Image (cartoon, rainbow, N blue to C red):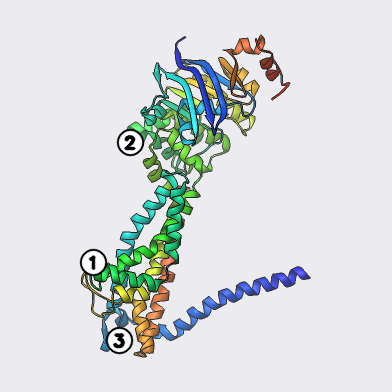
Amino acid sequence: MLQRIVKAQLWSLTGFTIGILFFIIFFISIKGLPQITLEFLTSNPVDMGRSGGIFSTIVCTLYLIFVSLMIAMPLGVGAAIYLTEYTRESRLTHIIRFGTECLAGIPSIIMGLFGFAFFVMALGLGWSILSGGMTMSIMLLPTIIRTTEESIKAVPYELREVSFSLGVTRWQTVTKVVLPSALPGIVTGIVLGIARCIEETAVIIFTVGSSLRLPESFFDSGRTMAVHFYILAREGISMPNAYGTAAILILSILFINLSAYYLARQFLKKIC
Amino acid sequence: MAAKIVVKDLSFSYNHQRVLSAVNLMVEADSILGIMGPAKSGKTTLLRIFNRLCDLIPHVRIEGEVFLDGENILRPGLNVDRLRKRVGMVFDKPVPLPRSIFENLAYGPRLHGIKDKKRLEELVERSLRLAQLWDEVKDRLNESAMKLSGGQQQRLCIARTLAMEPEVILLDEPTYGLDPISTLKIEQTLQSLKESYTIVLVSNNTWQVARTTDNVAFLLMGELIEYGSTHEIFTVPKDKRTDDYISGRFG
């Protein structure tokens, strides 16, 4: 009897957690989905976003994701490979790990301020996708390093021994055996990074700015979807358009998550 | 017979613990040397020195010399990857790489510069035939190697080593945990291989050593107790400890 009560309680707690998620998705969808038309997606905001669409903010978001990942991916994956494959546990690796943990703990508003002071002002890059991308990449590094490291460590040691015993060099072993097996974990880190780029606001306002113009290059300022939503809602410019943007935000994060996991599973099926 | 590997005063310690002390022995070309001894006697360590896989362990100290065809393989600056191509290894647990049967075998040769598809196919077929696995897998070379049975996987590992066209093959308890039929197949494979390869077989199974090897080295607590022809050691062992071990009184 007690077993049943505990089980029922645990089930309802789990159900509650999932319920919150579904409630949020449901709420945003009800309010936002009616706004979404082809025109909403393909036209630029007009009159500060009171009318028109969100095309320029979608483009800005995509640019930002591209720049952030182009910087954070090689750095993060490279650092994780170094920490796991090329060095033994030592004081140095502990300091590096501690450093990345600390980096992960810095509040995003502070990172925004740093990006503003360093990239925007000191380096003179101005409010631009490049400044924002570089600041974001610093924020993504800890997650990418951590997830990559964990998934590289999960690759059985025997596979490396076999590869070495065949006279294969360490670097070839890493690229041909270790990284392919660790790929699902690495993809997870990158997906989390993409989601972070989509949802971040504080850093973006400080470094990319909030211009509604369609960015033409990485040196242009712009406004991502999350910032657009924030400004529309906060300044009470247009609640329907704010919910429309929010719905697109949530849908795109769902879509990216699902497709990344699908790709990783297909890949695993192919090699195993 | 010509000596392929000569071990001179080889000592090995790990974290200040002696694993091998002053081992002297010789591996004849085109023959099978069996290394036997109870657990923790240093068998595997000795094997892993022959292809320098011991380099992967931190805090080790190696003294003495090991010659492969007269060249000291312990000298600093030796090209370890080239050594490992000449001295192949099969582990106690079959570890297929997570890819197809064909790709498992082509993995090593391809990374050593064999790109020609025809040549790779020949190499794969020849190695699988030598390891007596060809007939069982010839129709499903593109299937995952993980789907093979344990005994098949171990023969695949032998074939993978053979595909490197090595001169020496090291086997670390290759039939550990396998059923008697798989064990028999692997022993038959070894017999046919010794015509053109030098083989070193570490085994806990005394009868396997008696059945398959030409010479035997008996290790105990890192010391070489006795070394000689298999026939001699199993009929008239010189040392009492060898006698005790093979008659099962300890170990």
Q: Is residue B32 above or below residue A130?
A: above
A123 or A50, which is in the foreground? Answer: A123
For mark 2, what is the residue? B117
Inspect the image, locate mark 1, and give the three-letter code of the amino acid beneath it.
Leu
Residue A232 sits above or below residue B1 on the image? below
Marks 3 and 2 belong to one chain: no
Same subunit, tags 2 and 1 = no
The residue indicated by pointer 3 is A49
**Quadrant in the rendering for residue B210:** top right
- Looking at the picture, which amino acid does disc 2 mark? Lys
| Residues at marks 1 and 3 on the same chain | yes
At x 46%, y 48%, the residue is: A91
- The kind of residue tagged 3 is Gly
Q: Nearer the viewer, residue A214 or A96?
A: A96
Mark 1 belongs to which subunit? A
Query: Is residue A183 placed above or below B242 in the rendered structure?
Result: below
Distance, label 3 to label 2, CA atoms, is 60 Å
Residue under label 1, please give it. Answer: A123
Marks 1 and 3 in Cβ contact (< 8 Å): no
Nearer to us of marks 3 and 2 is 3
